[in-house]
Amino acid sequence: MIARDSMHFTANRVTSLRPCRCKPQSVLRALRVTLLFTALASTPGLAEDPQNAGASPVVSIDHNTFIPSEITVAPGTIVTWVNNEAMPHTVVDLNKGFQSKTLVKDAKFSFTFTTAGDYSYLCSIHANMKGEVIVKPGVS
């Protein structure tokens, strides 16, 4: 409304005929937060931690590194290694408990750890790549 004088008011026709394009900041903020949580919940790997969700742990092979380089699991757990790079790799237990074939890009190797203990492993092609699986009863 525009005031002509202190006693008479008239509507501003330009603004009264247009729909209001502005939204309160709280509504926009709520919308942004909702979209953010929706995006995070639908993104694999961010929505849930595989170890906490009861899924088998996965060790990624990327940038000549085992990621994570050390994991702790309960006896009976299946651990899967996935080669995420074009360079071939292997997974070899230093005590000869397990050994993968050569893993090309996107290839997987899984092993079930039945006995408690520490299992140090490496890539036989790149001996500087090392990792460890620690198997402890009671770990969930």
Image (tube, grey):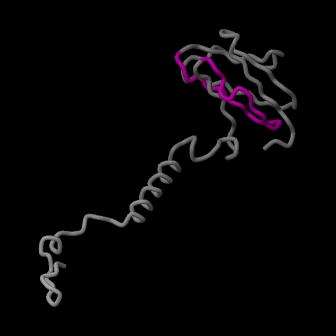
Q: Examine the structure image and report whether residue 75 is included in the region drawn in magenta.
A: yes
Prevalent SS, magenta region = strand
Q: Quadrant of the C terminus?
A: top right
Q: Quadrant of residue 133?
A: top right
Q: How many marks?
A: 0
Which sits in the foreground, 116 or 25?
25
Query: At which x and y percent is residue 87?
Result: 55, 14
Up the image or down, 118 lies above or below 27; here it is above
Q: Quadrant of the N terminus?
A: bottom left
In the rendered image, the residue lying farthest to the front is 6
Which sits in the foreground, 86 or 11?
11
User: What residue appears at the point 64 percent right and 20 percent down from the top-left corner?
Assistant: 65
Query: At which x and y percent is residue 95?
Result: 84, 16
**Range of magenta residues:** 64-86
Query: At which x and y percent is residue 52?
Result: 70, 45
Which sits in the foreground, 22 or 67?
22
Q: Examine the structure image and report whether residue 31 is included in the region drawn in magenta.
A: no
User: What residue appears at the point 29 percent right and 64 percent down from the top-left corner?
Assistant: 22
Q: Is residue 108 visible?
A: yes
Up the image or down, 16 lies above or below 48; here it is below
